[in-house]
Image (spheres, helix red, strand yellow):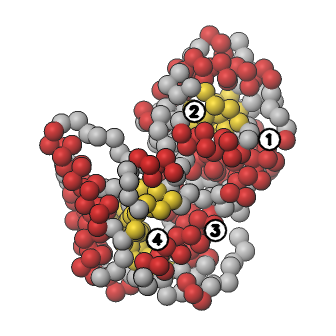
Amino acid sequence: MPSVTPRPRYQSVRVCFTSPYSVARIGGVGRFIQSLADCFHRLGVECEAIYPYPSYSTQSWFGAVVPLRMTHFRNLELAYRTAAVLLRRHAGYTIIHAQQVHLQSLAAVFVAHLLQIPCIVTVHLRDPPTKGALKKFVQSLIERLVLRAATRVVAVSQPVADSLGPRNTLVVENGVDTKVFRPLEAERREIRRSLGVEDSPLFIFVGRWSRHKGLDLLLSAIGSTLLRSRSYHLAILGERTSDLIGPVRDLPAYLSAADILILPSRKEGMPLAFLEAMACGLPVLASNIDVHRILFERTGCGWLFPSEDAHELAKVLAQIIDQGLDPSWRTKSRAMAEKYFDIERTATRYLEIFRDAISP
């Protein structure tokens, strides 16, 4: 990747990310941090991260991996260890960038106040209320304290901002490195050959094996009688289990090998998988939740199905297999990713927020 000459106005900014999720896993928050940090480095900005073990990151500059040893109260342990690392390394930071409303973020905000440096909190998705009166009270208290004490609160999409209620929330949509996530023809041929895929369509799912990602809906859909006589392939990338490909280091290659991304999520903030697939030239078949509708209206290519409806998902899959793809959609998807969601646009906006917070 060609290097970018550092911009002098950013050289004084030194960022510490905190994340309650392991960086560089298949999850979107980790990929967001990696992509944003890589772009920051190309712009001459020093940054590192504090995140829990395990991690698949191979970048030694990328900060402190926090091992969690406790069986219970792991969030409390992560918050304590994050605060300890921040206090030990405080001289190197001009700003803390915390991810999600989380106990770790509350620790980050508290330390930022002690060190008299700004703390920006990015909300990727508002967590639903937990069960139990005490847990619900603690969750609500952490949310109120984090959002009130943060120097700036950023939401990754307008629906996420709306979910936080009437407050001064900035919206910065996620971005994707379009130099990394791009159509890779040689890799496409190699992976399709290794998976035994010939001319039939290859669908791909990217995400954690969780209910809110809708993998159960996808598995129910592919068991439908509508698809039994049709020829297609499905690749599932996510947290490792016996029937998943699992975490992969070369996600752009797998996306390039596929024809359509399936995103049956029940909830999303601003799904990186959607943006990464577009950058690799894939149209997306997605549930019709708010943020997916926004992306679909902006890009103009792909399909929506009613959220929670596995039968309707199967019907759309059958339609795609029977009718094939509009050949112009690969080029159009790529062009829309470059126009609206390049990571440099996202990074520049965050750096403007950082500089404004540092020098109000």
Instruction: Identify residue type, mark 3.
Output: Glu
Residue at the disc numbered 4: 62
| Within-10-Å neighbours for mark 2: few <14, some 14–19, many 20+ | many
- Mark 1 element type: helix
Mark nearest the camera among 3 and 4 is 3
Q: Amino acid at mark 1?
A: Trp
- Quickly name the residue at label 3: 344
Rounded to the nearest angstrom, the CA distance separating label 1 from label 3 is: 24 Å
Q: Secondary structure at mark 2?
A: loop
Residue 168 position, x and y percent, is 41, 62
Question: What residue is disc 2 on?
Answer: 288
Residue type (three-letter) at the residue carrying disc 4 = Phe
Mark 3 neighbour density, 10 Å: few (under 14) some (14–19) many (20 or more): some
Q: Is residue 84 above or below residue 178?
A: below
Mark 4 → mark 2, Cα distance in angstroms: 36 Å
Q: Quadrant of the C terminus?
A: bottom left
Q: Is any atom of residue 45 visible in this view?
A: yes
Among numbered discs 3 and 4, the one appearing first in the sequence: 4
